[in-house]
Structures are given as C-alpha cells and as structure tokens.
Image (spheres, rainbow, N blue to C red):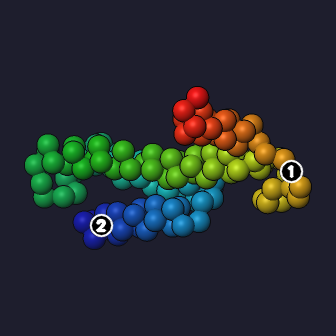
Amino acid sequence: MTAYFVTFIVLAFAMTWFCHIRRNSLLTSATMILWLALAMGLFFGGTPILALGTLWVDIIAWFFFTMMWVPLLLQMDTEITHEKNGRRWKQWSTEAPEGRGPTAYEDYRDKLYGRTRKGR
C-alpha cells in the first residue's frame, strides 16, 4: 500500500513539473485531481498509509492540498502572459498580428517610465 502511495506522489510531482514545461488545461485538471486525491486519501483514509503520527499525516495532507493549486497558478501565468503580449485566445494563431501598434499596456509603461526617469 505504501509503495502505491509513494508512486502516486512521484507521479503527482512529475505531472506538476510537466505542467510547468507544457501548459495544457487537461493536464492541469488531471494534476489538480491527483493532488486532491492524495490529500483526501490522507485526510479520510481509514488506515494510516504512512507510519507517522496523526499530526504529521495532517501536515502532509495540507501540503498536498496546497500543491493542488500549483498547476492552476502555472496555467494562469500562461494566460496572463499571453494577454499581456497583446494576443487573444479567440484568434487561431498564437502570434501577434503583423503591424500592430503598441498596446495600452505598452503605452502606459512608456509614459510611466518617462515620468519617473525624466523627473517630471
């Protein structure tokens, strides 16, 4: 039983690392469900999987519950970066259209830089 549990922990860490490399919504969802299953298995398991005290098992379960949100945060970082670069997910291509002007964010950044660096 412990070998299977350790295998699932290694799988969850590997999937989280893979979410960092290749951000995909389905992979993110599967990784979140795996972390949640590990946390719930420790919280509500009838038999202790690890030969530790109850407090340590609860701490590890809370760590697994916290790790459940890491793939989602990585996916959100991808979405925000994509939108910040002036791209929209509604378009088929992932690249910005040719000849586009500066975005509102770039205009704001340039104006703020001018105000703070030129002493205005």
Type of amino acid at the residue the image marks with label 1: Arg
The answer to whether residue 79 shows anywhere in this view is: no
Is 113 displayed left or right of 33 in the figure? right
- In this view, the residue farthest toward the front is 119
The answer to whether residue 51 shows anywhere in this view is: yes
Q: CA distance from mark 2 to mark 1?
A: 51 Å
Q: Is residue 55 above or below residue 99?
A: above
Quarter of the picture holding the N terminus: bottom left
The label on residue 86 is: none
**Residue 67 point in image, percent of width and height:** 38, 50
Residue at 19% over, 53% down: 48
The label on residue 6 is: 2
Q: Is residue 5 above or below residue 37?
A: below
Residue at label 1?
A: 100
Per the image, label 1 sits on a secondary structure element best described as loop
Type of amino acid at the residue the image marks with label 2: Val
